[in-house]
């Protein structure tokens, strides 16, 4: 076997791929024959990779994608049925919840690159990402109800993206919605032709990377914390964060650049 063939085979055997380019880390779920179902092994690799990226200052933005014909079909039902023990399920769902929280807690913004189907925990992953761009052939569902299982953990992120009644309709019927409906309901930001998906994600990513990394990471953390607060507490917290943000070198540079009508030269890239 040639070195090239060996490298390709090794890549095919990896269930999570990472590629870095221009400050963007792309994580690709690589179980295409299983529609990128979230096995416990894949969840473990996501946990490890997201923790590494959180500490990697060279990474400005993360894209989560799926190999093959789908984004992610949710949990690996075959693996779940092979382990019919509550202790196993407790561990599995806690592991999945930890992955979702790591996405939330990353200092870098995360964009879901969605094509094909995103169902159950796959739809949850889309909802958990900060942003989502979908191809026009993407479809979304929280379909556990069809096998007698209410998608409880997916409902956490889904219910924080779309209205309660829209979330409950999806959760109680298990019906698919198309990409245009997902955008209308707020589950994804943009819908583009399949052939334009990577270009659309690159344009969105580059628009964010051009901004100060301090402002972006500060803003992501602040946004999710304040949204769980009452309004008075949220304003108090936001005002404190904004005052601290004003002390950053990048803000002085940004204001000076604006007044001098020139592009800013960020200190923290």
Image (cartoon, rainbow, N blue to C red):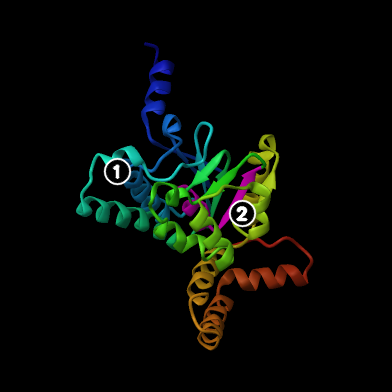
- Using the image, tell me which numbered label, if any, was put on residue 218: none
Indicate whether 67 appears above or below 155: above
> x, y percentage for residue 106?
45, 59
Can residue 267 be seen in this snapshot?
no
Is 105 or 209 nearer to us in this picture? 105
> x, y percentage for residue 47?
35, 50
Is 171 or 20 nearer to us in this picture? 171
Report whether 149 appears left or right of 130.
Answer: left
Quarter of the image for the N terminus: give it. Answer: top left
Rounded to the nearest angstrom, the CA distance separating label 1 from label 2 is 29 Å
Report whether 26 appears left or right of 132.
Answer: left
Q: Earlier in the sequence, mark 1 or mark 2?
A: 1
Indicate whether 181 appears above or below 232: above
Q: Which residue is mark 2?
A: 188
Q: Which residue is mark 1?
A: 80
> x, y percentage for residue 65?
51, 42
Quadrant location of residue 77?
top left
> x, y percentage for residue 89?
26, 52
Residue at 74%, 69% in the rendered image: 258
Can residue 231 be seen in this snapshot?
yes
Q: Nearer the viewer, mark 1 or mark 2?
A: 1
- Is the residue marked by circle 1 packed among few (<14), some (14-19), or many (20+) residues within 10 Å? some
Residue at 55%, 67% in the rendered image: 164
Residue at 29%, 51% in the rendered image: 92
Outermost residue toward the right in this view:
261
* Residue 129 is covered by the magenta coloring: yes
Residue at 23%, 46% in the rendered image: 84
Quarter of the image for the C terminus: give it. Answer: bottom right
**SS type, badge 2:** loop
Span shown in magenta = 120-135
């Amino acid at each position: 076997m040639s070195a090239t063939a060996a490298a390709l085979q090794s890549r095919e055997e990896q269930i999570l791929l990472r590629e870095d380019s221009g400050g963007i880390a792309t994580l690709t779920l690589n179980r295409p024959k299983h529609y990128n179902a979230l096995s416990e092994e894949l969840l473990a690799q996501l946990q490890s990779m997201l923790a590494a990226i959180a500490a990697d200052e060279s990474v400005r933005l993360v894209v989560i994608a799926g190999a093959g014909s789908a984004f992610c079909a949710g949990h690996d039902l075959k693996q779940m049925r092979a382990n019919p023990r509550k202790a196993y399920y407790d561990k599995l769902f806690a592991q999945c919840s930890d992955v979702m929280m790591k996405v939330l807690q990353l200092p870098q913004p995360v964009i879901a690159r969605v094509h094909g189907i995103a169902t159950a925990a796959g739809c949850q992953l889309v909802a958990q990402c900060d942003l989502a761009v979908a191809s026009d052939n993407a479809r979304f569902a929280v379909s556990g109800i069809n096998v007698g299982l209410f998608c409880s953990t997916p409902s956490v992120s889904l219910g924080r993206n779309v209205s309660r009644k829209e979330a409950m309709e999806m959760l109680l019927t298990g019906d698919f919605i198309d990409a245009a409906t997902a955008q209308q309901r707020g589950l994804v930001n943009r819908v583009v032709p399949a052939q334009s998906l990577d270009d659309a994600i690159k344009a969105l990513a580059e628009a964010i990377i051009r901004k100060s990394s301090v402002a972006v990471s500060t803003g992501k953390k602040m946004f999710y914390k304040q949204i769980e607060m009452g309004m008075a507490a949220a304003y108090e917290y936001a005002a404190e964060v904004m005052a601290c943000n004003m002390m950053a070198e990048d803000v002085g540079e940004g204001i000076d650049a604006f007044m001098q009508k020139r592009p800013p030269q960020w200190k923290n890239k």
